Structure formats: C-alpha cells, structure tokens
Image (cartoon, rainbow, N blue to C red):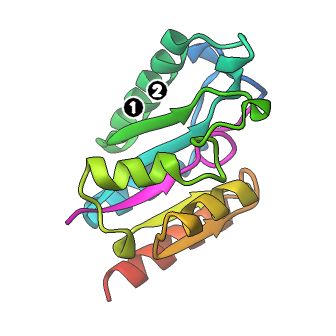
Amino acid sequence: MAKAVFLDRDETLNPDPGYIHDPELFNLFPWVASELKKLKDAGFMLIVVSNQSGIGRGLIREASLRAIHEKCDALLTEAAGIKIDSYEFCPHRPDENCDCRKPNPKLITESLRKFSIDPSQSYMIGDRASDFEAGTRAGLKQSFQIPSGSEEAFKKAVAEILESGSR
C-alpha cells in the first residue's frame, strides 16, 4: 500500500489573500517546494485536501481553481522537480452542511481508497483545527496543526514525518 501526506493548501502551502481566483495571485511559501521534495523522495504521495467555499459562493470558478493548481504544480516542478499527486477539494459553503467539508474526513478517506493508501503510514499537515480533526477522523497516523504561514512549524512537521516514517 502507498503512504501519503495530506496537505491543506491556503496558509499551509501558500499565502492566502482571500479567495484566490486568479493563478497570478497564487504563490508558494519559499520553503514549501524543498520540504515537499523531501517527502516525495521518501516515497510519500502528496495530496492537497482543501475547503474551497469560494466556488459555492460564486467567487471562484472551478476552471480557475484548476488553473491555480496547475500553477502550483508548475512552481513545484520548477523549484524541486515534483508535483502534487492529487488535488481534492470541497466546493460547498459552510452552511450547506456537506459531508466533504473539513473537518469531515471524506476528502481524505476517498483518497485513501482511490489510491490504496495505508492510513497508518500517512499524515496530515494544515493550519486549522478542521485540518487536524479531518486527519484524525480519517485514521491517519498523525495530524499536525501548524500556525498559518509558519516556516519553522512546517519544517518541523516534515522532519517528524520523515523520522516517524522511517521507523
């Protein structure tokens, strides 16, 4: 079975000025590519799981979201020769009470099945309690809640995953 690191997107991988709707507004934090490469080199799949209520609010089109993810992959390829394995997102507004919006674990559990991922060898990194809870509820080995945009905390989470994953 595969192993994976599930990643929140906004404020974990990139600064979020609020409802990014244009690829020109998307940039990775400077440390992200090199840290994700370490995870890829260690055999982890990288899967972004993201609440994108801007779609449900009519602020972002799905085509724009795909273009933003293509830019993310282009930046990662340019900086580190890697790409995200899968982008999973919830397009619903919070008031829609769907089953895919984090902290519900559906985005993760569906990925576990789709890619034959072993949850006991997989992790979640995100900046919100809902990210942490989604990873925990999905039965992942460990979830990390890091402060928004924290280089130190992101690098520490990656180091702990690599240390734990090598055991």
Q: Relative to 55, say whether 95 is above or below.
A: below
Badge 2: few (under 14), some or many (20 or more) residues near its Cα, within 10 Å? Answer: many
What are the residue bounds of the magenta stretch? 1-16
Seen as rendered, the residue at the extreme bottom is 167
| Residue 97 appearing in the image | yes
Mark 1 → mark 2, Cα distance in angstroms: 6 Å
Observer-nearest of 156 and 61: 61
Residue 156: image quadrant is bottom right
Q: Tell me the residue at 69%/44% (across/down).
A: 11
Report the side of 8 relative to 97 (left or right).
Answer: left
- Marks 1, 2: nearer the viewer: 2
Residue 22: image quadrant is top right
Q: Mark 1 and 2 residues: CB-CB less than 8 Å, in contact?
A: yes
Find residue 73 and name its label: 1
Q: Main secondary structure of the magenta part?
A: loop
Instruction: Quickly name the residue at label 2.
Output: 69
Going by the numbered disc 1, the residue's amino acid type is Asp
Q: Secondary structure at mark 2?
A: helix
